[in-house]
Image (tube, grey):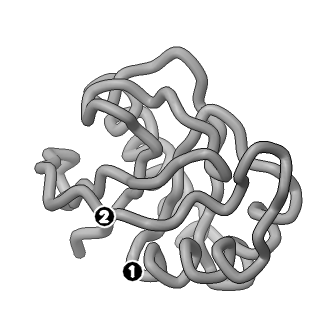
């Protein structure tokens, strides 16, 4: 079954934004065999505005990404991590990677996670 990943990217190529500073996320859909395609760029209000955290914007951003299994950013603060996890979204911090190199690694993780859950 396909799943979606939201990536904090300013250019659609690199994972180069913190979750709280990101005003948009690249959404990719990954198929069972690991191939993926870019679906859209989803705009959100950045929850962190010059050191001030807007909890309403945080909840709106998390809700806007609720159809994604993973959210990937350079950094994700503890408040955002908890908010994402409450929506059954796994937050992942990946620094210095491109979308094209990160998504296959996430898919490998997803496959191993599913295999481990079947083993129990």
As displayed, is residue 15 above or below residue 45?
Answer: above
As displayed, is residue 35 above or below residue 78?
Answer: above
The crowding category of the residue bearing disc 2, from other C-alpha atoms within 10 Å (few below 14, some 14 to 19, many at least 20), is some
* The image quarter in which residue 119 lies: bottom right
Q: Position of residue 100 (x, y in %)?
A: 26, 27
Numbered disc 1: secondary structure: loop
As displayed, is residue 18 above or below residue 86?
Answer: above
* Depth order, front residue of 56/42: 56
Residue, disc 2: 42
Q: Position of residue 67 (x, y in %)?
A: 39, 80
Residue 23, disc: none
Numbered disc 2: secondary structure: strand
Residue at the image point whose x is 44% and y is 79% from the top: 64
Q: Position of residue 79 (x, y in %)?
A: 85, 64
Left or right relative to 109: residue 43:
left
The C terminus appears in which quarter of the rendering? bottom right
Indicate which label's residue lies in the foreground, 1 or 2.
2
Residue at the image point whose x is 62% and y is 32% from the top: 74
The N terminus appears in which quarter of the rendering? bottom left
Q: Are marks 1 and 2 in contact (CB under 8 Å)?
A: no
* The image quarter in which residue 61 lies: bottom right
Residue at the image point whose x is 33% and y is 35% from the top: 104
Residue 67, disc: 1
* Depth order, front residue of 21/91: 21
Could you tell me how far apart the alpha carbons at marks 1 and 2 are, in whole angstroms?
12 Å
The crowding category of the residue bearing disc 1, from other C-alpha atoms within 10 Å (few below 14, some 14 to 19, many at least 20), is some
* Depth order, front residue of 38/11: 11
């Amino acid at each position: 079954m396909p799943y979606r990943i939201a990536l904090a990217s300013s250019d659609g190529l690199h994972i180069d934004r913190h979750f709280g500073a990101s005003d948009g996320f690249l959404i990719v859909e990954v198929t069972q065999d690991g191939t993926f395609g870019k679906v859209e760029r989803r705009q959100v209000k950045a929850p962190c505005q010059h050191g001030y955290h807007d909890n309403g914007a945080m909840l709106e951003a998390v809700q806007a990404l609720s159809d994604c299994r993973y959210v990937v950013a350079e950094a994700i603060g503890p408040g955002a991590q908890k908010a994402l996890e409450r929506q059954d979204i796994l937050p992942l911090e990946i620094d210095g990677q491109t979308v094209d190199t990160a998504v296959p690694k996430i898919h490998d993780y997803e496959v191993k996670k599913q295999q481990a859950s079947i083993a129990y």
